[in-house]
Amino acid sequence: MVTNRTTVNISITPELDAFLQSRVKSGRYQTTSEVVRELFDYYSTRRPNGKNASATQSQARRGAAQAVAGELIDGDDVFNELRELIEERRRSKQKAVRS
Protein backbone atom coordinates (compact mmCIF):
# COMPACT_ATOMS: atom_id res chain seq x y z
CA MET A 1 0.00 0.00 0.00
CA VAL A 2 1.45 3.36 -1.04
CA THR A 3 0.72 6.26 1.27
CA ASN A 4 0.80 9.87 0.12
CA ARG A 5 3.90 11.54 1.50
CA THR A 6 5.13 15.09 1.80
CA THR A 7 8.80 15.95 1.57
CA VAL A 8 10.12 18.18 4.33
CA ASN A 9 13.62 19.57 4.55
CA ILE A 10 15.07 20.03 8.02
CA SER A 11 18.42 21.08 9.41
CA ILE A 12 19.94 18.79 12.01
CA THR A 13 23.17 18.68 13.98
CA PRO A 14 26.04 16.45 12.89
CA GLU A 15 25.31 14.29 15.96
CA LEU A 16 21.70 13.74 14.90
CA ASP A 17 22.85 12.95 11.37
CA ALA A 18 25.32 10.40 12.75
CA PHE A 19 22.50 8.86 14.80
CA LEU A 20 20.25 8.57 11.73
CA GLN A 21 23.05 7.09 9.67
CA SER A 22 23.91 4.58 12.40
CA ARG A 23 20.30 3.38 12.46
CA VAL A 24 20.37 2.83 8.68
CA LYS A 25 23.75 1.06 8.89
CA SER A 26 22.32 -1.25 11.56
CA GLY A 27 20.24 -2.81 8.79
CA ARG A 28 16.93 -2.26 10.54
CA TYR A 29 16.03 0.67 8.27
CA GLN A 30 16.63 1.26 4.58
CA THR A 31 16.50 5.06 4.72
CA THR A 32 16.79 7.89 7.21
CA SER A 33 13.16 8.74 6.39
CA GLU A 34 12.11 5.39 7.86
CA VAL A 35 14.00 6.20 11.05
CA VAL A 36 12.37 9.61 11.35
CA ARG A 37 8.88 8.20 10.67
CA GLU A 38 9.35 5.62 13.43
CA LEU A 39 10.56 8.33 15.81
CA PHE A 40 7.47 10.40 15.07
CA ASP A 41 5.27 7.36 15.58
CA TYR A 42 6.95 6.63 18.90
CA TYR A 43 6.64 10.23 20.04
CA SER A 44 2.99 10.50 19.05
CA THR A 45 1.86 7.23 20.66
CA ARG A 46 4.21 6.56 23.57
CA ARG A 47 6.37 8.39 26.04
CA PRO A 48 9.81 7.49 27.40
CA ASN A 49 8.21 5.91 30.46
CA GLY A 50 6.35 3.49 28.19
CA LYS A 51 2.93 5.02 28.78
CA ASN A 52 0.65 6.34 26.11
CA ALA A 53 -0.27 10.00 25.82
CA SER A 54 -3.66 9.68 27.55
CA ALA A 55 -2.08 8.00 30.60
CA THR A 56 0.56 10.73 30.76
CA GLN A 57 -2.11 13.42 30.51
CA SER A 58 -4.10 11.72 33.26
CA GLN A 59 -1.04 11.68 35.52
CA ALA A 60 -0.41 15.35 34.78
CA ARG A 61 -4.00 16.24 35.73
CA ARG A 62 -3.72 14.24 38.96
CA GLY A 63 -0.42 15.95 39.79
CA ALA A 64 -1.90 19.38 39.13
CA ALA A 65 -4.83 18.59 41.43
CA GLN A 66 -2.42 17.45 44.14
CA ALA A 67 -0.45 20.67 43.76
CA VAL A 68 -3.59 22.77 44.14
CA ALA A 69 -4.55 20.75 47.23
CA GLY A 70 -1.07 21.32 48.72
CA GLU A 71 -0.25 17.60 48.65
CA LEU A 72 3.19 17.93 47.09
CA ILE A 73 6.42 17.04 48.85
CA ASP A 74 9.39 19.38 48.62
CA GLY A 75 11.99 17.89 46.27
CA ASP A 76 14.91 18.86 48.51
CA ASP A 77 13.28 17.06 51.43
CA VAL A 78 12.83 13.92 49.34
CA PHE A 79 16.46 13.92 48.21
CA ASN A 80 17.72 14.58 51.73
CA GLU A 81 15.70 11.64 53.02
CA LEU A 82 17.04 9.43 50.23
CA ARG A 83 20.61 10.44 51.06
CA GLU A 84 20.01 9.55 54.71
CA LEU A 85 18.60 6.15 53.76
CA ILE A 86 21.58 5.45 51.50
CA GLU A 87 23.99 6.43 54.25
CA GLU A 88 22.17 4.20 56.76
CA ARG A 89 22.42 1.24 54.37
CA ARG A 90 26.09 1.96 53.78
CA ARG A 91 26.77 1.97 57.54
CA SER A 92 24.78 -1.26 58.02
CA LYS A 93 26.78 -3.00 55.29
CA GLN A 94 30.06 -1.81 56.79
CA LYS A 95 29.01 -3.17 60.22
CA ALA A 96 28.08 -6.52 58.67
CA VAL A 97 31.46 -6.77 56.93
CA ARG A 98 33.31 -6.01 60.19
CA SER A 99 31.38 -8.67 62.12
Image (cartoon, rainbow, N blue to C red):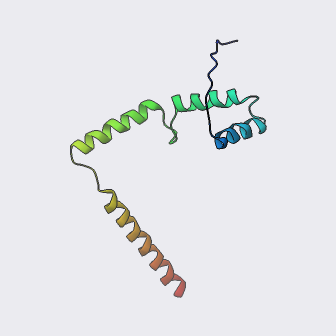
Work out whether 3 lies above or below 72: above
Left or right of 75 in this view: 43: right
Instruction: Provide residue 15's location: percent of width, then percent of height.
Output: 65, 44
Name which residue lies at 52% across and 39% down.
50
Instruction: Provide residue 82's location: percent of width, then percent of height.
Output: 39, 65
Instruction: Provide residue 81's location: percent of width, then percent of height.
Output: 35, 66
Name which residue lies at 64% across and 30% down.
36
Left or right of 54 in this view: 14: right
| Quadrant position of the N terminus in the picture | top right
Q: Residue furthest left?
A: 69
Name which residue lies at 35% across and 66% down.
80
Judge whether residue 33 can be spotted in this image.
yes
Q: Count of labels shown?
A: 0
Judge whether residue 99 can be spotted in this image.
no
Left or right of 70 in this view: 61: right
In depth, the one of 18 and 23 nearer the eye is 18
Left or right of 17 in this view: 46: left
Q: Quadrant of residue 6?
A: top right
Instruction: Provide residue 9's location: percent of width, then percent of height.
Output: 63, 25
Q: Residue furthest bottom?
A: 99
Work out whether 87 lies above or below 5: below
Name which residue lies at 57% across and 32% down.
42
Work out whether 5 lies above or below 73: above
Q: Quadrant of residue 8?
A: top right
